[in-house]
Image: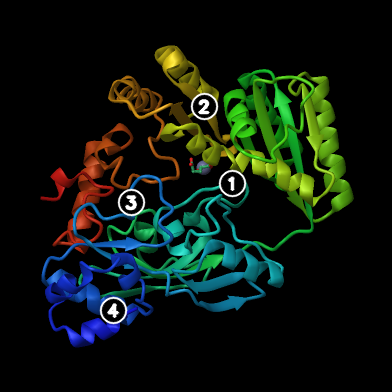
Amino acid sequence: MMTISSILRRYSGLKKLFKKMKNYKLQTLIGCISTKDQLSQILKYCNSRCLAVVPQGGNTGLVGGSVPVFDEVIINTRRMNSIISFDETSGVLVCEAGCILENLISFLDKKGFIMPLDLGAKGSCQIGGNVSTNAGGLRLVRYGSLHGTVLGLEAVLANGDVIDMLGTLRKDNTGYDLKHLFIGSEGSLGIITKISILTPPKLSSVNIAFLACQDYVSCQKLLFQAKRRLGEILSAFEFLDAQAMNLVLNHLDSVRNPLPSSVYNFYVLIETTGSEESSDKEKLEAFLLHAMESGLVSDGAIAQDFNQASSFWHIREGVPEALMKAGAVYKYDLSLPVEKMYDLVEEMRIRLGEKANVVGYGHLGDGNLHLNISAPQYDDSLLAQIEPFVYEWTSRHRGSISAEHGLGLMKAEKIFYSKASGTVQLMASIKKLLDPSGILNPYKVIPTSLLS
Ligand code: S2G
Ligand code: ZN
């Protein structure tokens, strides 16, 4: 495999390189970039010739944010995958953007720490991509957003300038905190090359409960109680409806229903993470007893061992895979007021009738609904019944049309459903300031019409 640096040395003009590249899988060829200096050289060259580039990490995104639209150069960061430092006192990890999330989780596990985020795609997603999309994941309810846990970044701008914001301090009030511009900008303002992130200590007592509720109001009330009765040990609060559960049971092998005695309308997965096994378990059991006695929970199980805990998580994390196996799927990743969230699922069911299977699941703990509409095949008339209804409904309820998956290519033009036009204009001004030639991830995040 030729490396980009050898090609850059051999070819004075990147244009000639393209002729060579046409015969290669662009990603394989570009994947050899392994230093910020190489990246800076490539961007400087591309910028000087208005050659568009697409930054790409693990390519696990769901809105087309890391794939080329036309003939953009793919710059894959997978070779920038070193751990630079880890401070075992503060828990601050400094690493390169191409580190795979699961590898960081394993590295930290040996040190007695954990990553503050956990995603179903951890086996292939890269931390640089997680940060550039401000990924949420399964534990945001406990550890917060990457805007809180990322302490610093290094990024390369379109003109090749390397911006060193790689602080490792919890508190630093010296000027504008520019790293936040890059967190969630999906590679449209600069390409992240290094991250410093605050990692929580790994605690010894983790308990998982898988519960059944008869209605959505009970799920809401259960969340209210969990935040008060479990308090600081609550580390995940996920929900899935019966439709999601049925898809998992029908499409994933080796998954069995932990609560088979009846068919329930909703399931809730609660995880607690603390330091005192006995008192944590007592707290969870007391919470569940109160929930059962008050009728919020119809049935439930607490995992008795690691395998059972994994099987509970496998159900929740298996929903996206089951949806893919079921056929065509229209995905909507929405932030909504918790009390309203499931109304949209029910209204969508009325709207679509027998045409599709409407599924609701997600991170109830942080008000993030994954509304997925499953159908035998993609169908424009079905899509016309879904959009713009789903966006208008979300906007009417002051929700976000993208809670954690980002806007990418698929939702860039939908940004106005969740952001005021003046705000989007300011975003466009910042984009034009940092990338005047518009070479970084074009057609993504910001409506193209604002950038011409
Ligand atoms: C989840 C995963 C991606 C998807 O399950 O929490 O964010 O397919 C999703 O919806
Ligand atoms: Zn999610």
The residue indicated by pointer 3 is 65
Q: Residue at x 74, y 50 (%)?
A: 273
Tell us which disc is closer to us: 3 or 4: 4
Q: Quadrant of the N terminus?
A: bottom left
What residue type is disc 2 on? Val
Distance CA(mark 2)–CA(mark 1): 18 Å
Query: Where does the image place residue 144, in percent across and percent down from the top left?
Result: 56, 50
Up the image or down, 424 lies above or below 246; here it is: below
Distance CA(mark 4)–CA(mark 1): 37 Å
Badge 1 element? loop
Question: Does residue 405 appear in the picture of this structure?
Answer: yes
Query: Where does the image place residue 408, in percent across and percent down from the top left?
Result: 32, 47
Distance CA(mark 3)–CA(mark 4): 23 Å
The residue indicated by pointer 1 is 138
Distance CA(mark 1)–CA(mark 3): 21 Å
Of the two numbered discs 4 and 1 on the same chain, state the one appearing first in sequence.
4
Q: Quadrant of residue 222?
A: top right
Q: Residue at x 29, y 38 (%)?
A: 415
What residue type is disc 1 on? Leu
Q: Is residue 149 left or right of residue 377?
A: right
Distance CA(mark 2)–CA(mark 3): 24 Å
What residue type is disc 3 on? Gly
